[in-house]
Image (spheres, rainbow, N blue to C red):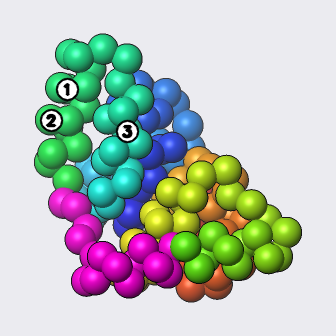
Amino acid sequence: MLVDSSVLVRFLRGEPTAEVELLTRAMTQSLAIWLAPPILQEVLQGADRQDRFNRWDRVLGELPILLPNDLRAITRAAARLYAQCRWKGVTPRSAKDCLIAMYAIEHGLPLLHCDRDFDHIARVDRRLEIVAVP
């Protein structure tokens, strides 16, 4: 599964949420956990101190990162998705969320998140599979 920064930051800070519990269970069961470049950027840019940045970078460095088959194509697809959301009356707070959604779609991975924008995006593009959190 692809794990969004909204979950990873909570995980790294030790916040007890249902999404963090699901991520922790997946890690202990050695299930595949993936990053995408914009997720890595979002997490690391949120570090409030150099030592935290370094620690988070080490932890996230253990996870495999998705690379697009075609950077131009995925960027264009993310822009189209953002526009389609707007055309349907839903404007995601971050265009980066559409890029993250496209990484999940392109690689056929479900997305674990704590960001309501992804639920809206998934209603616009049904190919985006959201991880169900109990």
- Image: magenta residue range: 64-78
49, above or below 70, in the image: above
The disc at residue 106 is none
Counting from the top left corner in percent of width and height, residue 90 is at 79, 65
Q: Is residue 11 above or below residue 66?
A: above
- Quick one: SS at disc 3? helix
3 or 2: mark nearer the eye: 3
Mark 2 and mark 1 residues within 8 Å of each other at the beta carbon: yes
Residue picked out by circle 3: 43
Residue sitting farthest toward the right: 89
Say whether disc 3 or disc 1 marks the residue closer to the N-terminus: 3
Q: Which residue is drawn at 34% across and 79% down?
A: 72
For the N terminus, the image quarter is bottom left
Query: Pointer 1: what residue?
Result: 55
Amino acid type, callout 1: Arg
Q: In the figure, residue 17 lies in which quadrant? A: top right
Q: Residues within 10 Å of mark 1 (few under 14, many from 20)?
A: some
Q: Going 28% across and 83% down the picture, which residue do you hit?
A: 70
Q: Distance between the residues labelled 3 and 1?
A: 12 Å
- For this view, does 15 lie left or right of residue 91? left
